[in-house]
Image (cartoon, grey):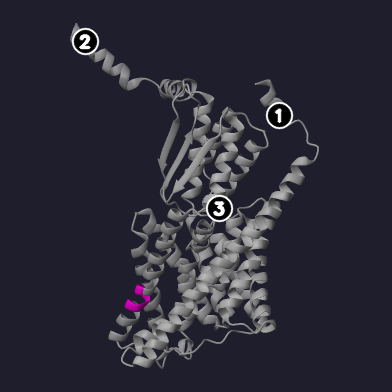
Amino acid sequence: MSLLKNLKFAIHAITKSRSDDSNLASLRFGENLSPNVRAIRLSIAVADSLIGAGVAVSDVVAMSLDITERYCSRRVMFDISSTTIMASQDRGNEREPLTMIRHSSSRTPNNLLIQSIQELVRSIDDGDLTLDQAEEAFDAILEKPPKYPFWLVALGGGTISLGVGVMFGASPVILIIMFLLGSLVSYILRVLSHHRVPAFFSQVLSSIFITLVAGGVAWLGNQSDLVWFHNLNPTLIVIGGIVMLAAGLAIVSAVQDAIDEYYMTANARLLRVSMMTAGIVAGVAVGLYFAKQMGIFIAVEADSQPLGRGDWQFTGAILIAAGYALSQQSRLASVLLSGAIGALTWWTYTASSSAMNVDSVVASGVAAMVIGFTGTIVARFWRTPSSALVMAGVVPLVPGLTLFNGLMQVIEEASSRTQFLDGMMTLFTALLIALAIASGASFGTFIARPLRRTVIRARNALPRRELYSNTEED
C-alpha cells in the first residue's frame, strides 16, 4: 500500500497543472513581499535591462529612483559599478537595512525596448500606474520585447556602409558591394553574438572578411574580361566596414559616465571600446597581410580619399545616421529623425571647418557638441532615447578613413622609419577625433540636461486630468 501511495503522489506531482505552479509562484513572490521590497526589485530589474543595453549610468539611476520615490516610503540609494547594480535602503533604527544586488550582462542593442521601458517609468513617475500595474506592464515588456527581425537589422548595417560609399562618391558597383557586404557582416555579427562568441573575436573575424572581400574586388579589377570591376576603388569597402563596425561602440556613453563620475563603469566601458577597436585594427591588418601573401594589393592614396560632391556628402551622412538607427532597432520616426540629425551633423562639421578654419579634430568636436545638445532636447518631445539620437548623429564623424590610412602607412611602409612614424601619427589623429566626438557629444548632453529638466517641470506644472485616482483609491 505504501508503494501505491508513493506512486500516486509522484503521478500527482508530475501531472499537476501549470496554473497551480503559477498561483504558488504568485503567492511566494508577490503576496508575501511588502510593496517596498517589490518596488526595489522592480527598479533594479529596470536598471538591469537598461545598463545592459548601454544606457548612460546617470540616466539609469535617475529612472530607478523615479520608481522607488513613487512606491517606497524611504529613500533608496543606487550604485552601479561596471556590471554590478546595488540598491540599498536604510529602514530606520528598529529594522535592518535592505540591500539588493544584481549582475547585468550586455544585451543586443534594442532602442524599441529602451523606449518602452522609458515610457513605463514616465507613467510611474506621473502617478498613472499602481505598483501591481507597473509590475504587470514590465513583465509584459520583457515577455514579448518589441524588436525587429534579423534581416531588417542587417539592412541597417548595410545602409551604414552604403552611406559611406555615397559620401565618398563611389561608383554604383562599389555601392552595391558595400551594401550587400555590410548587410551580410551585420547578420554574421548577430549570429556570432547569439552563439556567445566574444565580441573581440567577432570584430577580428568581420574585419578580416571585409578586407579580403576588398582584396577580391581588387583582384577582379585586374582581370581583362571583367570590365565591370575595372577602375574600382576597393579602399571604400574597407572604410565602410570600419565605420559600420565602429558605429556600435558606446564610446559616448563611456565618456558620459566618466563626466558623471561613475569612474568604474566608465573605465569598464572604455576598456571594452578599446578592445573592440583593437579587434578592428587587428582584423584589417591580418586581412591585408593575407591579401599581400596571395599577391593581391589594395591600392590606397597615402594622404586622403576625396569626398564626393556636397549634395552626395549630405546624402551619405543621412544614410549613415538612419542606417545606424535602424541597426539599433529604433522606431520608424526615430530612424527618420536620425537621418535629419545626420544632415545637421555634417552641415555643422563642414561649416565649422570652413568658417573657423579648424582641423578635423576640432570640427568633429564642435559638430558632436551640437548633436549632443540637439539630440537631448529633441528626444524628450519625440519620446525616444536621447542616446539613440546622439549616437546616430555622431556616426558620420567616425574616422574610418583616417584609421585605415594610418594602418596602411604602418603596414605597407614598415621598412621606412619616416613612413612608420607618419602612420603612427595618423592613428593618433584618429584617436583624437574619436575622443573629440565623445567629449563634444557628452558636453552637449551635459549643458542640455538643465534645459530639459526646466521643460519637464513646466509641463508638469500644467493642469492635468485625474491621474492619481487609482493611487488615491488604493
| Numbered mark located on residue 4 in the image | 2
Please check the rendered image and state whether residue 273 is part of the magenta-colored stretch, yes or no.
Answer: no
Residue 226 in the image: x percent, y percent?
43, 88
Q: Distance between the residues labelled 2 and 1?
A: 58 Å
Q: Is residue 48 above or below residue 312?
A: above
Give, as a single range, the part of the protein colored magenta.
282-286
Q: What main secondary structure does the magenta stretch of the protein show?
A: helix
Which image quadrant for residue 198? Answer: bottom left
Give the label, 1 or 3, closer to the camera. Answer: 1
Residue 451 shows in the view: yes
Query: Would you say 333 lies left or right of 300 here?
Result: right
Residue 87 in the image: x percent, y percent?
47, 38
Residue 237 shows in the view: no
**To which residue does mark 1 refer?**
468
| Numbered mark located on residue 111 in the image | 3
Q: What residue type is labelled 2?
A: Leu
